[in-house]
Image: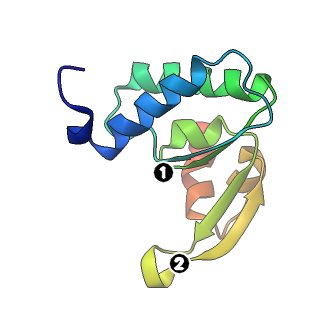
């Protein structure tokens, strides 16, 4: 990396930890929780990350992602949309379901943008 581990950003440290986990051959029945793992990543890197996360799921693990990136959301098996706004104006479950189900919910801001991406 060219720098001390203590100087890594939260996202960089998260990716190092994920790389360490992925190098373990027998990960199964593990819950991975990632907070906005795509922040600062190039589109191609996001594509690669999604492929790696799918491999974790295919190995029998569960991946929970907190994310605003619509490419990640549309690739999810299940979406829980919180809102209607952020901070004090949010925190309620607006809708949940497959990306297609969320896209059909007229109360969901996420669904509004997701609908265009799923076309």
Q: Which residue is more in the foreground, 116 or 111? A: 111
Q: Which numbered circle lies on residue 90? A: 2
User: Which quarter shows the N terminus?
Assistant: top left
- Above-or-below relation of 3 to 86: above
Is residue 42 rendered to the left or right of residue 115?
left
Label 1 vs label 2: CA separation? 14 Å
Q: Position of residue 110 (x, y in %)?
A: 57, 57
Q: Which residue is pictured at 65% across the width and 34% down the height?
A: 75
Residue at the spot of label 1: 68
Is residue 10 rendered to the left or right of residue 57?
left
Q: Which residue is more in the foreground, 83 or 56? A: 56
Q: Position of residue 3 (x, y in %)?
A: 18, 27
Q: Position of residue 92 (x, y in %)?
A: 64, 77
Instruction: Say what secondary structure mark 2 lies in.
Output: loop
Q: Which residue is pictured at 48% across the width and 83% down the height?
A: 89
Q: Which residue is more in the foreground, 9 or 65? A: 9
User: Which quarter shows the C terminus?
Assistant: top right
Label 1 neighbourhood size at 10 Å, few (<14), some (14-19), many (20+)? some
Is residue 91 rendered to the left or right of residue 68?
right
């Amino acid at each position: 990396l060219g720098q001390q581990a203590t100087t890594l950003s939260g996202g960089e440290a998260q990716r190092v930890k994920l790389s360490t986990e992925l190098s373990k051959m027998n990960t199964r029945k593990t819950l991975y929780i990632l907070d906005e793992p795509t922040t600062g990543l190039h589109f191609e890197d996001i594509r690669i990350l999604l492929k790696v996360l799918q491999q974790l799921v295919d190995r029998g693990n569960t991946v929970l992602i907190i994310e605003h990136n619509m490419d990640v959301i549309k690739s999810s098996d299940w979406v829980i949309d919180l809102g209607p706004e952020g901070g004090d104006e949010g925190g309620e479950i607006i809708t949940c379901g497959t990306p297609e189900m969320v896209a059909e919910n007229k109360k969901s801001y996420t669904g509004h943008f997701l609908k265009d991406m799923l076309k």
